[in-house]
Image (cartoon, rainbow, N blue to C red):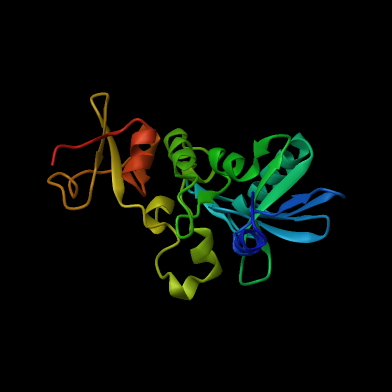
Amino acid sequence: MLTFRSLLVLSALLLTAPVAVALTQSGAVRVVDGDSLELAGKKIRLFGIDAPERGQSCDRNGQTWDCGAWSAAMLARAVQAGRVTCAAQDTDRYGRTVAICHAGGIDLGQAQVRVGAAQAYVRYSDHYLPDQAMAQTARAGVWAGRMVTPEAHRHPAAHPGPKSAPSSAANGCAIKGNINGGNRIYHMPGQRDYDATRITTAKGEAWFCTEGAAQAAGFRAARR
């Protein structure tokens, strides 16, 4: 039997423990952009992803396209899958709730990354890196061409560099996934063949942020 003192200790632990607060839809969902929305009037930033901003353009085969508007449209389509619920993970510096949200059982962040409408936001989480690896391999969405990362687009002075830089390299992903004679091999910086390896995304080759992401996409480690 719990003593009164034990109950007090248990209550204190429960009060101080981190809790993911469920936010239940009670009204229409409004999509703000590819990684944020409003749910019942509350501003939500999707956890673990970063999508092209409204007004941001990307490059595909030398042609610019409005990847920011497209990303928002993909999220708007995803939220139509069913009732939207979110589990709060944090609060960002703008006062928005950072949350993992689902619509009809579909993880909205994961859905955005898988179709190439957003990147895994590795600065804060590697949760969606395996999904990004699949999108990179398939050259889905933004991975079909070149872009400035959303973060660099928001803060260009802090991320100097040409707008034609490969999106994966601009995102700090330095592992090279190479396909040679049907063999899918990834090369780490500093390895013997790293500098000589060239990545051609049209062949299904890709850049990866972690070895786990490369392995999830079917690549094996090169011999050291």
Which residue appears farthest toward the top when viewing the image?
A: 182
**Residue 138 is at least partly visible in this image:** yes
Residue at left offset 53%, top offset 65%: 153
Residue 37 coordinates in the image, percent (x, y): 73, 55
Residue 34 is left or right of residue 160, and the answer is: right
168 or 94: nearer the viewer:
94
Q: Is residue 182 above or below residue 125?
A: above
Q: Image quarter for residue 181?
A: top left
Residue 16 coordinates in the image, percent (x, y): 61, 64
Residue 216 is left or right of residue 175, and the answer is: right
Residue 79 coordinates in the image, percent (x, y): 74, 42
Which residue appears farthest toward the right when viewing the image?
A: 27
146 or 86: nearer the viewer:
86
Residue at left offset 27%, top offset 24%: 182
Q: Is residue 89 above or below residue 205?
A: below
Residue at left offset 65%, top offset 64%: 8
Residue 57 coordinates in the image, percent (x, y): 57, 56
The C terminus: image quadrant: top left
